[in-house]
Image (cartoon, rainbow, N blue to C red):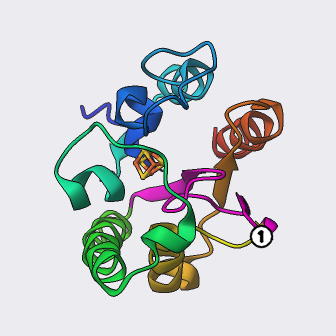
Amino acid sequence: MDNRSDKFVFVPFCLMAQAYQAQDIVKYEWKSAIMPFMQVLLENHINIIQMPCAEVEFQNELIRKPKGISKYDTIEFNNHCEKLANQVACQVDLILKSNYKVIAILGIEQSPSCCVNYIYTNQGMQKRKGIFIQKLYDKIKSYHIPIIGINRKYIKKSLEELKEIVGSEN
Ligand code: SF4
């Protein structure tokens, strides 16, 4: 008898550990994990894979000032994200090859590395993916896995999207 769940969701590192966020931007009610998303995943027995934090791993330090996407968009940071995206894409491949399911990947809107739909810049809002998420998306897009961007200020929409996907898999 084997009782495991065959469903996986990949989450940004900081979804489970807000202390990995840049300084002064953990303003909402969740001090550590962003609880409502974790609750949905745990209550529905979803295996959770914590993706690496591109920014912390790049500078090898947790404490950092927030920086805009133009500051991150360097050859070095792109190469670093490419490596991380390869690692995560290999994990996705392995899971799918094992006949398990990756039902969603989560990102964090407005992050230069992990946004899914938009980021605010000096030139206003740009519709684009973050550097890490874009590279990951390019490697796994053929699998058509939904990628959901979390706006930490207004979580309702992304939470509903996640609930809908989880519900349809049950
Ligand atoms: S780089 Fe990604 S995982 Fe790291 S703190 Fe920013 S949004 Fe979270």
Q: Residue at x 48, y 58 (%)?
A: 102
Q: Does residue 83 appear anywhere in the picture?
A: yes
Drawn side of residue 43 relative to residue 64, left or right: right
Quadrant in which the N terminus is drawn: top left
Q: Residue furthest left?
A: 60
Q: Residues within 10 Å of mark 1 (few under 14, many from 20)?
A: few
Mark 1 = which residue? 126
Q: Is residue 151 above or below residue 51?
A: above
Quadrant in which the C terminus is drawn: top right
- Residue 117 painted magenta: yes
Please state the horizontal and vertical placement of residue 127, each as a whole percent of the image: 78, 71
Front-most of 9 and 28?
28
Q: Residue at x 56, y 54 (%)?
A: 111
Q: Residue at x 67, y 33 (%)?
A: 152
Q: Does residue 47 appear anywhere in the picture?
A: no
Drawn side of residue 153 relative to residue 40, left or right: right
SS category of the residue bearing label 1:
strand
Front-most of 101 and 59?
59
Please state the horizontal and vertical placement of residue 19, each as a whole percent of the image: 36, 27
Q: Is residue 2 above or below residue 144?
A: above
Q: Is residue 23 above or below residue 98?
A: above
On the image, which quarter does residue 157 sit in? top right
Chain part drawn in magenta = 100-125
Cβ of mark 1 under 8 Å from ligand 1: the answer is no
Q: Residue at x 16, y 51 (%)?
A: 60
Q: Is residue 128 above or below residue 27?
A: below
Please state the horizontal and vertical placement of residue 69, each as a whole percent of the image: 55, 67
Please name the amino acid that badge 1 sits on: Gln
Front-most of 75 and 9?
75
